[in-house]
């Protein structure tokens, strides 16, 4: 069964550091990452904020990115494709050595919050060894299997807590609701899809910590 890790890293140890520092108000949400050949990573990512022109100018001069291309645009976001180059030794390439998958990543100013899926404990250990050997800084927020949390506690992560409390304060859980998921996502500066994921994972962790008395394996023979 695959393992999910959620952690934060400084932006200079992932990608787009100079760009995010130049336009700290902009939020980058990675939609998909594709490893291309042996020395290239091609991410698709949305940017949200009011400064897309300056973002593009900064990205054009950022040594960690090449060939940035605008693919789509909505009222409040722009979708780009780019290439991240391997000569920038960052966490963005460490994960390719283990066959892991970046399932969610949000960057702003000086920090990225990542969620990654590993095939097994061995690949996770290899990844962590790579981070340690290269002196990468990271804060592990959560570690669990797809349907079986591995952490001793099932507390919500900081992003999940922010999403849950923002939705509560906005009246999202009232009957009838006082706001929509789109409005809550806008308040948090993330996409509706990212908010939905955080709420579902937050619900799961709260239920497991409050209602599950036994470890999931305890009832299995």
Image: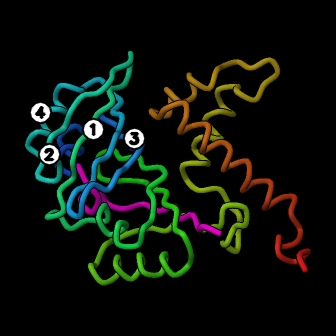
Residue closest to the far left: 61
Q: Is residue 176 magenta?
A: no
Give the secondary structure at mark 1.
Answer: strand
Residue contact at pointers 3 and 1, CB within 8 angstroms: no
Residue contact at pointers 3 and 2, CB within 8 angstroms: no
Q: Quadrant of residue 173?
A: top right
Q: Which of marks 4 and 3 precedes in the sequence? A: 3
Question: Residue 66: which numbered mark, if any?
Answer: 2
Give the secondary structure at mark 3.
Answer: strand
**From mark 3 to mark 4, how far is it between C-alphas?**
18 Å
Dot in front, 4 or 1: 1
Question: Quarter holding the N terminus?
Answer: bottom right
What span is in magenta?
1-16
Tag count: 4
**Residue placed under numbered mark 1 in the picture:** 81
Pointer 3 local density, CA inside 10 Å: few below 14, some 14–19, many at least 20: many
**Residue placed under numbered mark 3 in the picture:** 29
Q: Which of marks 1 and 2 precedes in the sequence? A: 2
Dot in front, 3 or 1: 1
Above or below for 171 versus 98: above
């Amino acid at each position: 069964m695959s393992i999910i890790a959620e952690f934060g890293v400084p932006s200079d140890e992932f990608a787009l550091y100079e760009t995010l520092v130049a336009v700290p108000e902009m939020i980058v949400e990675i939609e998909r990452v594709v490893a291309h050949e042996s020395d290239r990573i091609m991410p698709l990512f949305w940017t949200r904020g009011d400064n897309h022109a300056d973002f593009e100018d900064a990205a054009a001069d950022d040594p960690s990115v090449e060939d940035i291309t605008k693919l789509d645009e909505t009222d409040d976001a722009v979708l780009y494709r780019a290439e991240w180059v391997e000569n920038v030794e960052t966490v963005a390439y460490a994960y390719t050595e283990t066959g892991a998958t970046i399932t969610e990543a949000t960057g702003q100013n000086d920090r990225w919050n990542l969620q990654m899926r590993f095939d097994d404990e061995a690949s996770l250990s290899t990844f962590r060894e790579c981070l340690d050997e290269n002196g990468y800084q990271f804060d592990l927020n959560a570690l669990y299997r797809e349907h079986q949390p591995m952490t001793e506690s099932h507390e919500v992560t900081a992003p999940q807590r922010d999403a849950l409390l923002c939705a509560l304060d906005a009246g999202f859980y009232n009957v009838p609701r006082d706001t929509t998921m789109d409005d809550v996502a806008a308040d948090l500066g993330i996409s509706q899809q990212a908010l939905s994921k955080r709420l579902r994972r937050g619900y799961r962790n709260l239920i497991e910590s409050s209602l599950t008395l036994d470890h999931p394996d305890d009832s299995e023979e």
